[in-house]
Image (cartoon, rainbow, N blue to C red):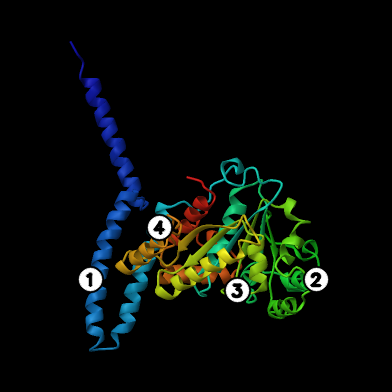
């Protein structure tokens, strides 16, 4: 005869444990991701309806602007809370250099230039954070970051000491690359900064016909290239001697663009310039076009179709449009001299840049 009393007793014990667990979860406000998402979607609907209602009232009563702002802020903060639960605090994985295109280049650094003739497309933000991600992901890889923009935004972001020399000194022949390179606070990442003196340097080099005007930077880096696996260059929205020098030593070009008419015009101008520089650098290759401020609307997809119609490579990774919250965190990262991965590692922009970095390095 089968004794069911023990089974029944065990079921009661499991039920009691389950009830206790539920109480612990409830008392400590511990919820599953599914429950958090369910709450998020429900609250989203409620608050979006309230925001729409307030927007309708705004034209009749301007005082509602304050309430609308409060609701919008609550909505964004709610999304941030969900993001923090869904994504890890450090999305950058430790990677092996053998799994990337850096393998086999240990005796000569690989150089990638970020560029577009159109300014204000988020190029510096993406460029700098990509360099940081590479330096963080590979314990055995050394990154050289070159700020080739007279505005020096990347140099400021990295808290550079301009008194130690800049790319201007290299272009003018006042100092060697080894003398100008300075350490950043990141162990695997060094910097050649830029300043406004680059304007005068470009002018001076053009007037000096006794030198190889287009290969000054390439020649200068020969003494240090064995110290680095990869070089990332942030270029200005311009075509001048310093940009020509950058392209003369570049292996891969990444063109960052917004999906709008003016930015795409800068893309096509840049492609034309790349073809003109090819005689100076036969290995120069357009790695791909990276869409920034991506949104899922018809105009964005039309822009992508237009790029493809020109038979140009385009990255699968896209950098999504920065929300108010994301812009706040990007500004905080800049003012705090941090990468977005340090300031807010689980935000969508950080995840997008990491996905782009992996694609750039041919990682799945």
Name the element at disc 4: helix
Name the element at disc 3: loop
Disc 2: which residue:
173
Q: Image point 76% across, 69% down: which residue? A: 170
Q: Image point 58% across, 75% down: which residue? A: 238
Answer yes or no: do the residues labelled 4 and 2 have beta carbons within 8 Å?
no
Q: Nearer the viewer, mark 3 or mark 1?
A: 3
Residue 313 is marked as none
Q: Residues within 10 Å of mark 3 (few under 14, many from 20)?
A: few
Q: Nearer the viewer, mark 2 or mark 1?
A: 2
Give the spatial CA distance, label 3 vs label 1.
49 Å
Disc 4: which residue:
83
Disc 3: which residue:
239
Q: Answer with mark 3 or mark 1, whichever residue precedes in sequence.
A: 1
Residue 49 is marked as 1
Give the spatial CA distance, label 4 vs label 2.
49 Å
Q: Image point 37% across, 51% down: which residue? A: 28
Name the element at disc 2: loop
Name the element at disc 1: helix
Give the spatial CA distance, label 2 vs label 3.
21 Å
Give the spatial CA distance, label 4 vs label 1.
22 Å
Comparing 272 with 339, the one in front is: 272
Q: Give left or right: position of 23 versus 140.
A: left
């Amino acid at each position: 005869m089968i004794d069911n009393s023990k089974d029944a007793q065990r079921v009661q014990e499991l039920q009691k444990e389950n009830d206790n667990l539920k109480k612990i979860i409830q008392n400590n406000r511990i919820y599953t991701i599914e429950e958090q998402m369910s709450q998020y979607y429900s609250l989203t609907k409620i608050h979006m309806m309230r925001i729409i209602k307030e927007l309708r009232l705004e034209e009749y009563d301007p005082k509602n602007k304050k309430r609308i702002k409060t609701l919008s802020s609550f909505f964004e903060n709610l999304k941030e809370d969900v993001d923090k639960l869904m994504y890890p605090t450090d999305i950058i994985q430790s990677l092996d250099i053998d799994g990337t295109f850096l393998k086999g280049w240990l005796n000569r650094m690989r150089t990638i230039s970020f560029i577009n003739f159109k300014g204000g497309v988020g190029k510096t933000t993406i460029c700098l954070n990509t360099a940081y991600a590479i330096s963080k992901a590979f314990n055995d890889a050394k990154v050289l970051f070159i700020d080739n923009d007279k505005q020096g935004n990347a140099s400021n972001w990295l808290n550079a000491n301009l008194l130690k020399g800049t790319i201007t000194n290299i272009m003018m022949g006042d100092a060697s690359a080894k003398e100008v390179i300075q350490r950043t606070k990141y162990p695997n990442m060094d910097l050649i900064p830029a300043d406004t003196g680059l304007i005068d340097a470009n002018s001076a080099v053009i007037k000096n016909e006794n030198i190889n005007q287009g290969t000054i930077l390439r020649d200068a880096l020969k003494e240090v290239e064995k110290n680095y696996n990869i070089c990332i260059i942030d270029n200005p929205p311009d075509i001048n001697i310093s940009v020509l020098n950058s392209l003369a030593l570049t292996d891969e070009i990444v063109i960052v663009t917004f999906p709008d008419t003016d930015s795409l015009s800068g893309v096509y101008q840049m492609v034309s310039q790349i073809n003109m520089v090819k005689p100076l650098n036969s290995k120069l290759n357009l790695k791909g076009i990276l869409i920034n401020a991506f949104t899922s609307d018809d105009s964005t997809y039309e822009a992508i179709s237009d790029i493809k119609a020109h038979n140009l490579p385009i990255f699968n990774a896209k950098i999504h449009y920065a929300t108010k919250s994301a812009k706040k965190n990007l500004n905080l990262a800049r003012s705090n001299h941090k990468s977005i991965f340090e300031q807010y590692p689980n935000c969508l922009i950080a995840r997008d840049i990491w996905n782009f970095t992996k694609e750039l390095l041919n990682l799945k």
